[in-house]
Image: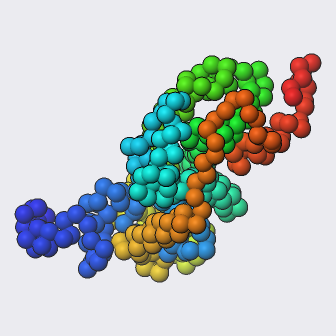
């Protein structure tokens, strides 16, 4: 019979009731996943191969860590930042020069943004090169869907970074957003309308600032959070990282040829049944899997900590820039889009093409 909560609390001193990093049995390792809401993304067992440092380089987890750093530092900045054309620049200047450690929080936020754009891109390249966008073996897989979710995440990450660029309301911000939204104007047929919707008019002013502020601080982070949660849950539904498929395939081949039985994991990886993602074998289960708690959770903890320490050290040396207040009458030469849009800036500057008699330049 299952012990009730009171008995369990007495027996375990309350420790394992929520979660433990030191499970004493396979059952406890599984239970710590079931009981902890944050760990519901993980199965009770993880394939050893997907824990390799060199296969995925943990770039997805590093992206999550950067997003968390951005959320925390962003909320701190929100206490001090004023989204008004008259006061935005001064409030950022105060954060930079007056508020204790304000410069440091700004630097962390800025550095984590640039790192996130780069790391999400590298994660995408890694997923592409390892063919993780294709379905392998296993019931209920839909890796192409997760690839598409990933592409949306990449685009939203870029847009999130771009909307933040305007907020300091200095020369760098103003002109980077001018160039960036001019690029949007080049979209065939609806470019003008896109630029109008982004700016809230024909030029960058209070309407633009409040639009970018709401997008940057509320809508886009909420959207990214929902997408990341779904993206990670899908990795689990797809039976773990794609590398796992090759082992399962080999095992199944081997077992079919020597006649051993195979079993399938149910949703929590604790019991057998048909609600399955991954087919594996009874014979070699031990060899290929470990308990997610602590093997996976410990690695995730290390990646989160490592990313945090990296951003802290980087921010001690590289601060966030703050130029003169925005001035629509003084154009810097050259006026540049943010670095992650430079390729687009060059592309639209040098490319002209004609479709059905209409020329786009
Ligand atoms: C905010 C952005 C993103 C976050 C936080 C994120 C997070 C993650 C995490 C934690 C994993 C599992 C572990 C790992 O591979 O490191 C993962 C896997 C995966 N991600 Fe992302 N991801 C993001 C963007 C993208 C993008 C842009 C793509 C591609 C267009 C993508 C495609 C995939 C694929 C295909 C997998 C499965 C990899 C495999 O099976 O080997 N993700 N993601």
Quadrant (top left/top right/bottom left/bottom right) for the N terminus: bottom left
Q: Which of the 4 image quarters holds residue 43? A: bottom left
Quadrant in which residue 341 is drawn = top right
Residue at 47%, 46% (x, y): give it.
94
Q: Residue at x 55, y 75 (%)?
A: 52
Residue 186 or 34: which is nearer the viewer? 186
Left or right for 153, reference 195: left
Residue 15 position, x and y percent, is: 18, 71
Residue 138 visible in this rendered orientation of the protein:
no
Say which residue appears at 45% left-offset and 72% top-offset.
302
Closer to the camera in the image, 227 or 322 = 322
Q: Is residue 329 left or right of residue 18?
A: right
Residue 188 shows in the view: yes
Residue occupying the point 43% across, 58% down: 101
Is 254 left, or right, of 31 in this rendering? right
Q: Residue 270: x percent and y percent?
A: 33, 65
Relative image position of residue 192 (x, y in whole percent)? 72, 21
Camera-nearest residue between 9 and 335: 335
- The vertical placement of 17 against 210, above or below, is below
């Amino acid at each position: 019979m299952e012990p009730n909560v009171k008995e369990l609390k007495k027996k375990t001193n309350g420790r394992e009731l929520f979660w433990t990093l030191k499970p004493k049995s396979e059952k406890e390792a599984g239970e710590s996943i079931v009981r902890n809401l944050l760990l519901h993304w993980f199965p009770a067992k993880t394939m050893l191969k997907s824990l390799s440092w060199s296969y995925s380089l943990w770039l997805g987890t590093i992206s999550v860590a950067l997003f968390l750093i951005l959320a925390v530092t962003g909320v701190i900045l929100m206490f001090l930042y004023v989204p008004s054309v008259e006061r935005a620049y001064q409030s950022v200047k105060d954060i930079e020069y007056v508020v204790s450690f304000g410069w440091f929080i700004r630097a962390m936020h800025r550095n984590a943004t640039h790192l996130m754009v780069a790391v999400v891109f590298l994660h995408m390249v890694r997923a592409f090169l390892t063919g993780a966008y294709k379905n392998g073996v296993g019931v209920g897989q839909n890796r192409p869907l997760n690839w598409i979710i990933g592409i949306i995440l990449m685009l939203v990450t870029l847009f999130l970074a771009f909307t933040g660029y305007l907020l300091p309301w200095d020369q760098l911000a103003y002109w980077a957003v001018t160039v960036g939204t001019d690029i949007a104007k080049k979209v065939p047929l609806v470019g003008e309308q896109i630029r109008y919707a982004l700016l809230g008019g024909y030029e960058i002013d209070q309407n633009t600032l409040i639009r970018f502020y709401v997008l940057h601080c509320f809508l886009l982070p909420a959207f990214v959070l929902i997408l990341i949660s779904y993206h990670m849950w899908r990795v689990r539904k797809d039976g773990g990282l794609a590398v796992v498929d090759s082992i399962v395939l080999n095992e199944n081949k081997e077992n079919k040829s020597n006649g051993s039985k195979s079993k399938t994991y149910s949703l929590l990886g604790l019991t057998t049944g048909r609600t399955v993602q991954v087919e594996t074998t009874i014979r070699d289960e031990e060899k290929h899997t470990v308990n997610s708690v602590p093997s996976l959770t410990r690695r995730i903890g290390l990646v989160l900590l490592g990313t945090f320490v990296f951003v802290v050290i980087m921010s001690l040396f590289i601060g966030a820039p703050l130029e003169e207040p925005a001035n629509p009458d003084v154009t810097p030469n050259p006026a540049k889009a943010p670095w992650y849009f430079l390729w687009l800036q060059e592309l639209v500057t040098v490319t002209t093409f004609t479709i059905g008699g209409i020329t786009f330049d």
